Image (spheres, grey):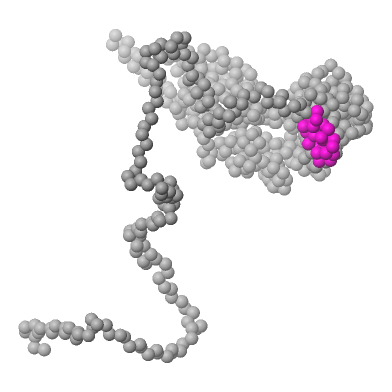
Amino acid sequence: LQNMSSRTHSTETTLRQSYYELKKAEKSGDYERALKLCDRILKLKDGADDVALLCKIKRGKSYCLYRLNMLEEAAAMLNSSPQLDIVSKELLAQILYRLEKSEESYKLYKEVLRNSSDGYDDERMANINAVISELQYQNPSKPLVELEIKPDSYEHIYNESCRLIALNEYEKAKEQLILAYCHQMLGEITEAGNILNEIIKKKNVSMVVQAVASNNLVCLKKDMNVFELKKRMKFCMTSQLDRQLNTRQKLGICLNGTLVSLQTNQFDAVTRSIEILSKTYGRDDLAILCEMALMSAKGNAGQAEKKLEEIFANKSAGECSLAPRLAQAQIFINQEKFEKAFDVLTSLAENTLRPAILSVLLPLCHMVNNERTMKCDKKTLVGFLQECASFYTKNNDVKTALIYLKWLHDVQPDDLNALVNLINAYMLIDERKAEELSRTLPDFDEFVRDLNVNALENTNWLALGSKYAVKRATRTETPKPGATANALIIGGKTRKRRRKVKLPKNFDPNVPPDPERWLPKYERSGYRKKKDKRTKDRDIGRGTQGMISDDTTNLEMHVSPKQAAAPQAIGPRQMHPAPQKPKKKKRPGNKW
């Protein structure tokens, strides 16, 4: 037993020494010696930590794959481990973020933050804030929990500003970090352009930042010359940036490159970009829009019209995206096919009642006949007529509003609200017609027939609220049969006792009572407020105590004549002589 214990002790000492030498070899860069030391350490291991060693090897291999941008293989390597420690979970969360699986990454980061206790929480908070900002870009209507951010950390502030930008809170994002993007979205074009130009001119800025700045500058400056446009977009679309940009950023750059190629009449490049938008990014709506713009630029508007009709022929209004449908309506309006444009805009279901679409439908409605208008869906037609009548009424165009109100009354003759609005409109123009229509209103008795007058007159619920009335109703108990009869037999009728009124002493019924009797004491006419002696000398010593001025030149220096002193009257108590002061006695020893 002593030999076994001494052997174990020597093995631990050798391991400790080997680890120490391995650390020294790593610092000095002697990697050949480090490999030999690693082999010695693995031979000394007795197999007790095989699982932990396997996990560490897989984690190291996964990190190498992550650095080589082989993200799928790195995630598969970590997921194949029997158990994941905190470090492996943190690495997996970062890999999932790079794979744009933000929800899974967010869950893992929360677990790591909850269970970690080392000094790297600041970096983890910055990373989880980046994940939150990406989630907000995907779904801005679902705000997530805000994290406490340290203002001295640049990564925290930058990621927090990205999160605020995703929520369209640009002013708050400017407070966190002054970004050119915030200026651009707020319409501050000059400030945004100056910042972007400064970023592009700097040499120590990374390629990703320069690419994003160039892309935003192309969107910002529409008067840029063709050569500079091509130069900026060519730099943004280099293959070196594919690994460092996410899908959302690459989609924006691809779309801007398509528009630049369209503007510079590079139609072959536009065709290639349309294929990338559809196949790589799955944005068929953007691809359709760019294809229609390409056909219109080539002068084939009729071909674009046929292409759109083929696309939307086998799709319902809910399956079709809004932007291509609006593009189709725009093509019809450009070709002065107003009836087809009207049909497209009225087939957009609830989107038809949007203010921008209504502003286009209003003039189109005057250009098409009423028969085509009546063919559209009744729900859409009613909403459209109500919005039109409300718009013209608010703008004091009563005659035009009357046209839509009549139309609405014809579509829904049983709708009382439509009839009342029509009568109100006629009251401003033709009172006789309003009086005739008012006779068609149902009688007042039909409205009052089902009303419970007693419930309305009981005003307790008005003062105390509806809950009080409900409680009173629930407290009423139904008496048991025969209970009232037994109570009368046993106890008889209950009599209410009336107490005798007590009058005050010396009460005279002929003298009317004081009218101020029920007023509060301080509101009566004879009330006198007591003086508070504590504040009697409060103002002594307050105010200005005199001020010295140097402006003595303006003073008039003359002697005023003295007034003769008035003789004071002697009172009766001052007639006797004044008392003499006692003489001072000389001190002994004082000669003087």
Q: Quadrant of the C terminus?
A: bottom left
Q: Position of residue 267 (x, y in %)?
A: 87, 30
Residue 422 or 64: which is nearer the viewer?
A: 422
x and y percentages locating residue 345 in the rendered image: 83, 28
Instruction: Return the residue nearer the eye: 117 or 10.
Output: 117
Q: Does 486 appear above or below 184?
A: above
Q: Nearer the viewer, residue 550 or 161?
A: 550
Residue name at image x 51 percent, y 17 percent: 84
Q: Residue furthest front?
A: 510
Res. 386 visible in picture: no
Residue 108 at x, y percent in the picture: 54, 22
Give the quadrant of the N terminus: top left
Q: Residue at x 35, y 17 (%)?
A: 10
Question: Is most of the magenta stretch helix, strand or loop?
Answer: helix
Residue 13 vs residue 460: left or right?
left
Residue sitting at x 73%, y 39%? 216
Please identify the quarter of the rendering in which residue 306 is found: top right
Left or right of 565? Residue 414 is right
Tell me if residue 89 comes above or below residue 545 in the rendering: above
Q: Is residue 478 left or right of residue 213?
A: left
Q: Is residue 297 magenta?
A: no
Extent of the magenta region: 418-440
**Residue 367 appears in the rendering:** yes
Query: In the rendered picture of this protein, how many numbered marks are placed on residues?
Result: 0
The image quarter in which residue 403 lies? top right
